[in-house]
Amino acid sequence: MHTFTYALFPHAGTWKEAGTVREAYQLNLPAYAVQGGHAGKSFSYAAVEPQNVVLETVKQAENGEGVVLRLYECENARTKTVVRLPEGAKEAYLTNLLEEIQEELPIVDGKVCFVTKPFEIQTILVKYAWNFLQKPQKGLAPFCGFLYNERKPWESIRLEPMGWST
């Protein structure tokens, strides 16, 4: 037996103006609550602007040296993309899909900026001031939880709780 979800999304204007891609993600990836954290505080590992660029993947680099962020432009528009990185990011690079470094991206105020072409997939490799596979030093990793490898759950990475940035 197969189960699927089907939805109609009536809207005014174009599919881009209505935020159809965002609605589709909310339908297919519903939010869920987990225990932990502090009431009234939030944390995002990485954030991307503007909304027509979608952060699709956060994973350990294939060589184990950093974290890969994979994103794409979803509205057929050339876009100045801004990615906000977590505290402790020391280097960032644009790579190809094989994670081979193509260009260094300067990190300014915890952000990297670059241009994304229409429907382009971008891969960013982020390296940290601490070894990602070892317990991070206190104050350099304001997050906790897991980086979960959906295809190989046994390769998931445990991130030790280090507190929240305020």
Image: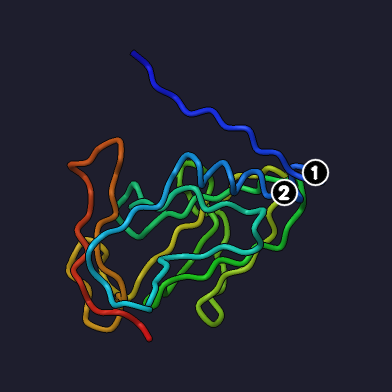
Q: Quadrant of the C terminus?
A: bottom left
Q: Could you say where residue 32 lies in the image, as x and y percent from the top left?
A: 34, 53
Corner quadrant of residue 65: bottom left
Residue 44 falls left or right of residue 36 = right
Q: Which residue is mark 2?
A: 18
Residue 12 falls left or right of residue 83 = right
Residue 63 falls left or right of residue 30 = left
Q: How is the image coloured?
A: rainbow
Nearest the eye: 92 or 150: 150
Q: Residue furthest right?
A: 13
Compared to 114, does 136 lie above or below?
A: below
Classify mark 2: helix, strand or loop.
Answer: loop
Q: Could you say where residue 67 lies in the image, as x and y percent from the top left?
A: 38, 58
The amino acid at mark 1 is: Thr
Disc 1: CA contacts within 10 A as few (<14), some (14-19) or many (>=20): few
Q: Which residue is mark 1?
A: 14
Residue drawn at the location 28% of the way across and 84% of the way down:
139
Corner quadrant of residue 163: bottom left
Nearest the eye: 9 or 118: 9
Q: Could you say where residue 137 lies in the image, as x and y percent from the top left?
A: 22, 79
Residue 59 falls left or right of residue 107 = left
Compared to 153, does 6 lie above or below?
A: above
- Quote the CA–CA distance across marks 1 and 2: 6 Å
Q: Are marks 1 and 2 in contact (CB under 8 Å)?
A: yes
Q: Could you say where residue 161 lies in the image, as x and y percent from the top left?
A: 20, 72
Q: Quadrant of the N terminus?
A: top left
Corner quadrant of residue 143: bottom left
The amino acid at mark 2 is: Ala
